[in-house]
C-alpha cells in the first residue's frame, strides 16, 4: 500500500508505526481504502480514552484480496461519523463503543446500549466513571 496517497488526499494524516492517524475525514478515508485498496473487511473498531478525556477510535481493516491489514485511527470527543454504510459489521462495534464510552455515531440509526440496560447512568469504561453499590445492584430481570 502506498501511504503517500493518503498524505496527498487527507491533509494532516500521519503514519505512526503500522497505522494512519487522521485529523478528520474518517468516512472519506475508509471509503478510499475500501475502493482503492480493496480493504473490504472491517475486523473491529476499538476505543481508548486518553488523559485529556478524548477517545482514539481505531478501525482495523483487512484486504482479503491482498492479505493485508490497515489500521486507521482518529481522535474524537463526544461523537464520530458512522461507517455502517461502508461496513455493516460496524453496527455492533459502534453500539459497544457508545454503550461503554458514550461516543455517539452520527448516521447510525441503530445506536443503542448493547450490554448495559437503557436506564444505566454513565459509561463504564470512561476514566471518570464512578462505581457505586447502587448502580451494580441488578434484579432478576436485569433491571437496575
Image (cartoon, rainbow, N blue to C red):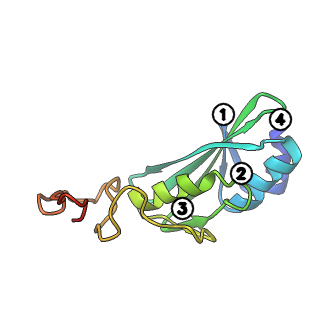
Q: Which corner quadrant holds the N terminus?
A: top right
Task: Assess disc 3: are there few (<14), some (14-19) or many (≥20) residues with their C-alpha within 10 Å of its C-alpha.
Answer: some
Mark 2, secondary structure of its residue? loop
Between the residue at mark 2 and the residue at mark 4, the CA separation in whole angstroms equals 15 Å
Would you name the residue on which mark 2 appears? 13
Residue at far left of view = 133
Query: Which numbered mark, 1 or 2, is in the foreground of this view?
Result: 1
Residue at far front of view = 141
Residue 73 in the image: x percent, y percent?
A: 61, 49
Between 107 and 25, which is closer to the camera in this rendering? 107
Task: Assess disc 4: are there few (<14), some (14-19) or many (≥20) residues with their C-alpha within 10 Å of its C-alpha.
Answer: few
Residue 47 in the image: x percent, y percent?
A: 49, 50
Residue 80 in the image: x percent, y percent?
A: 58, 65
Would you name the residue on which mark 4 appears? 1
Residues marked 2 and 4 touching at CB (< 8 Å): no
Would you name the residue on which mark 3 appears? 76
Residue 18 is labelled as: 1
Between the residue at mark 1 and the residue at mark 2, the CA separation in whole angstroms equals 13 Å
Between the residue at mark 1 and the residue at mark 4, the CA separation in whole angstroms equals 11 Å
Between the residue at mark 4 and the residue at mark 3, the CA separation in whole angstroms equals 26 Å
Task: Assess disc 2: are there few (<14), some (14-19) or many (≥20) residues with their C-alpha within 10 Å of its C-alpha.
Answer: many
Q: Earlier in the sequence, mark 4 or mark 3?
A: 4
Q: Earlier in the sequence, mark 1 or mark 4?
A: 4
Amino acid at each position: 500500500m502506498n501511504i503517500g496517497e493518503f498524505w496527498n488526499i487527507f491533509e494532516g494524516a500521519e503514519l505512526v508505526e503500522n497505522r494512519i492517524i487522521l485529523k478528520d475525514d474518517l468516512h472519506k478515508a475508509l471509503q478510499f481504502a475500501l475502493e482503492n485498496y480493496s480493504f473490504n473487511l472491517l475486523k473491529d473498531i476499538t476505543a481508548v480514552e486518553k488523559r485529556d478525556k478524548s477517545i482514539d477510535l481505531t478501525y482495523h481493516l483487512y484486504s482479503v484480496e491482498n492479505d493485508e491489514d490497515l489500521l486507521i485511527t482518529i481522535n474524537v470527543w463526544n461523537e464520530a461519523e458512522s461507517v455502517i454504510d461502508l461496513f455493516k459489521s460496524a453496527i455492533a462495534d459502534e453500539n459497544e463503543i457508545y454503550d461503554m464510552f458514550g461516543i455517539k455515531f452520527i448516521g447510525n440509526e441503530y445506536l443503542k446500549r448493547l450490554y448495559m440496560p437503557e436506564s444505566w447512568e454513565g459509561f463504564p469504561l470512561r476514566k471518570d466513571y464512578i462505581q457505586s453499590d447502587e448502580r451494580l445492584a441488578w434484579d432478576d430481570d436485569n433491571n437496575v
